[in-house]
Every structure is written in structure tokens, then in C-alpha cells.
Image: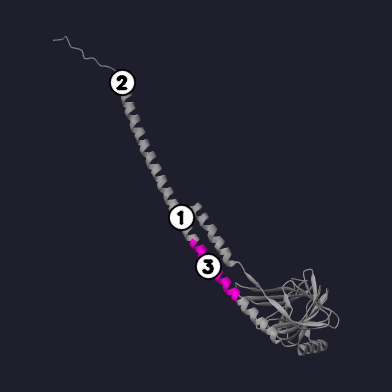
């Protein structure tokens, strides 16, 4: 029985792992507007950014002095300001949960995020720096960073900020009109938005260019392709699960038949052995009887002379 259970466990576990595997689809952003010197780094390749360029996971965007670039990720968008460097760390759709994952890493400089699209339950949008991580569900906020400290300032909504240099320190919420500085060995304190940052945020929002028509059309086409890929993959997953279930059922039936044959064979062997043992006992008894008869002493009868 243990052998049977073990043999059945293998395909069932394999099927379960297959179902839980998270298949991902790569999303992309598109350059909507730029000014000055903006470069896209893709591995070893570095090229000047142009309107309409695709921005994908693993790429890095850099801006020079008096330069900026607007990049749309569907309805959400970022404006990367001058002298900045941003890595597109994660830009995926998790098929299992239909969840969009966005993680941008601001190594240095300033970046404004406009998360206009309401995020679903399993969606995430994060901006990380060498010292902090800012996560949101729908808001407009600025992140400024160098290697030693960062600033998170919220224009609308609420941003949750973690101090990555001190994991023991509790995250803080930065609501509308507030800001927080994150620095090593320093407790985070939420403060009123400074007049300088308040003006900067308003100017950035005012200067944000709406998504160009052709770029919106590209997003709609890409969205359709991604959703189709999700549907197709789910259909493949269902087919694979159904095939695995059928294989498991066949394995069970085969194992049952094998076990039944083994049991019958063992029973037949046991019956044969018992019969042979009984024959041996009977034969030995007869042989013993014959030996006893052969050694029995002869008793002579004497006639009496007494009258």
C-alpha cells in the first residue's frame, strides 16, 4: 500500500506544482514626450530616447541637465526630471492573479509618479531608492534621491514609505500635502510639504503632457494582445490539468490491476505451498507407519501340554 501511495503521489504533486506556477507576461511603457538629453540603456546598448520608444523591464533611463522625459505605463505615468537615473526593475502581468506589478528604482535624481489607474487587489506600484521604498494604490507623488537619503512628497492620495536601511523601523504613511525624508540611522518623521516642493509638484503636474493618440492606440493594441495571451495561457493550463488528471486516473487503474494480480499470485502461491505441505505431512506419516510395521517383533503362539 505504501508503494501504491508513493507512485500516485508523484503525478499528483507534479500536477499541483504546474497549477501554482506563476506565468508572467512582460508589459511595456512608451515615451510620450521628452526634452533635452534622454537615453535608454538596454543591456550593453545605449541609445538616445525618442517619442514612441518602448520601455521594458530591465532597461534604465537617464536624463541630462535641463532634461526630462514623460513615460506612460498604460494610464499611469512618470516624469523623470533632470540628472536622474531610473531602472525599470519590474514591469509584468502575473497571469494567475491577473495582477500588474510595477517597480521602478530611482538611483539618483527626481521622479514624479501619477498613478491614475485604480490598482486592483493584487496590483502593486512601487518606487525604490537606495534608502527607501514607496508603495501606492493610486496617487501623485515625487521621489527625490541620492545614495545617502531620499525624499517622498505626496501631492494627492497616500504613499506608504519604508526605510530600507532599517527594516525594524515601522513604515509610515505620507498623506496629501505631506513629505518625509528617509536617511540611515534616522527616524522617519512626516512633515508638512515645504513651499518649494509644493510649487515643484504643482508645476510638474501642470506640465504633464496627455498621452498622444498614437501611443494610446498602441497601448490599446498591446492590452488586447496581453489579455489574449492570458486567456490562451489559462486555456492551456486547464488542458494540461485535465490531461494530468486523466493520466492520474489511468495510473490509479493500472496500479489497482497490478496490485490485484499480485494479490492473486500470492494467494495461489500460498495455496500451492499449503497443499504441498499437507502432502508432505501425509507422506511422512505413512512412511513412519511403514517403518513401525517393519520393526514390530514376531510373537509365536505356544500349544499348552497341560490337559
Instruction: Give the foreground label among 1 and 2.
Output: 1
Instruction: Give the foreground label among 2 and 3.
Output: 3
Range covered by the magenta-colored residues: 228-246
The spot of residue 216 in percent (x, y) is: 68, 84
Q: Residue at x 79, y 89 (%)?
A: 203
Q: Quadrant of residue 101?
A: bottom right
Q: Quadrant of residue 113?
A: bottom right
The spot of residue 275 in percent (x, y) is: 35, 38
Question: Given contact means CB atoms under 8 Å apart, are the residues at marks 3 and 1 in contact?
Answer: no
Distance between the Cα atoms at labels 3 and 1?
Answer: 22 Å
Q: Which of 190 and 38 is in front in this view?
A: 38
* Mark 1 Cα-neighbour bin, 10 Å: few <14, some 14–19, many ≥20: few
Q: Nearer the viewer, residue 231 or 22?
A: 231
Q: Earlier in the sequence, mark 3 or mark 1?
A: 3
Q: How many labels does the image show?
A: 3
Question: Given contact means CB atoms under 8 Å apart, are the residues at marks 1 and 2 in contact?
Answer: no
The spot of residue 25 in percent (x, y) is: 65, 72
Question: Given contact means CB atoms under 8 Å apart, are the residues at marks 2 and 3 in contact?
Answer: no
Quarter of the image with the C terminus in it: top left
Is residue 232 highlighted in magenta?
yes
Reading the image, the residue beneath label 2 is 294
* Mark 3 Cα-neighbour bin, 10 Å: few <14, some 14–19, many ≥20: few
Majority secondary structure of magenta residues:
helix
Left or right: where 15 falls relative to 222:
left
Examine the rendered structure and indicate whether residue 275 appears above or below residue 209: above
Q: Which of 240 and 134 is in front in this view?
A: 240
Extreme residue in the top direction = 305
Reading the image, the residue beneath label 1 is 254
Specify the label residue 239 is tagged with: 3
Left or right: where 65 falls relative to 272:
right
Q: Earlier in the sequence, mark 2 or mark 3?
A: 3
Amino acid at each position: 500500500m505504501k508503494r501504491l501511495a508513493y507512485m500516485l503521489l508523484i503525478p499528483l504533486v507534479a500536477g499541483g506544482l504546474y497549477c501554482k506556477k506563476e506565468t508572467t507576461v512582460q508589459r511595456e511603457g512608451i515615451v510620450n514626450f521628452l526634452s533635452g538629453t534622454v537615453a535608454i540603456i538596454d543591456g550593453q546598448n545605449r541609445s538616445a530616447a525618442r517619442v514612441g520608444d518602448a520601455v521594458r523591464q530591465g532597461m534604465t533611463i537617464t536624463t541630462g541637465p535641463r532634461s526630462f522625459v514623460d513615460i506612460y505605463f498604460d494610464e499611469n505615468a512618470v516624469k523623470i526630471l533632470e540628472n536622474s537615473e531610473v531602472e525599470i526593475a519590474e514591469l509584468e502581468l502575473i497571469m494567475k492573479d491577473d495582477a500588474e506589478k510595477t517597480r521602478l528604482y530611482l538611483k539618483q535624481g527626481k521622479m514624479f509618479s501619477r498613478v491614475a489607474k485604480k490598482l486592483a487587489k493584487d496590483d502593486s506600484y512601487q518606487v525604490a531608492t537606495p534608502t527607501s521604498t514607496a508603495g501606492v494604490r493610486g496617487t501623485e507623488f515625487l521621489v527625490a534621491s541620492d545614495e545617502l537619503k531620499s525624499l517622498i512628497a505626496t501631492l494627492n492620495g497616500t504613499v506608504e514609505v519604508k526605510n530600507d536601511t532599517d527594516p525594524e523601523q515601522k513604515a509610515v504613511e505620507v498623506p496629501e500635502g505631506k513629505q518625509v525624508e528617509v536617511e540611515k540611522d534616522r527616524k522617519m518623521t512626516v512633515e508638512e510639504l515645504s513651499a518649494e516642493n509644493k510649487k515643484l509638484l504643482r508645476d510638474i503636474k501642470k506640465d504633464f503632457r496627455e498621452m498622444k493618440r498614437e501611443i494610446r492606440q498602441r497601448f490599446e493594441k498591446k492590452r488586447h494582445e496581453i489579455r489574449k495571451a492570458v486567456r490562451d495561457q489559462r486555456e492551456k493550463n486547464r488542458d494540461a490539468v485535465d490531461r494530468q488528471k486523466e493520466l492520474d486516473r489511468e495510473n490509479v487503474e493500472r496500479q489497482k490491476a497490478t496490485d490485484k494480480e499480485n494479490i492473486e499470485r500470492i494467494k495461489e502461491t500460498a495455496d500451492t505451498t499449503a497443499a504441498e505441505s499437507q502432502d508432505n505431512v501425509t507422506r511422512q506419516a505413512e512412511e513412519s507407519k511403514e517403518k513401525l510395521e517393519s520393526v514390530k517383533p514376531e510373537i509365536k503362539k505356544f500349544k499348552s501340554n497341560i490337559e
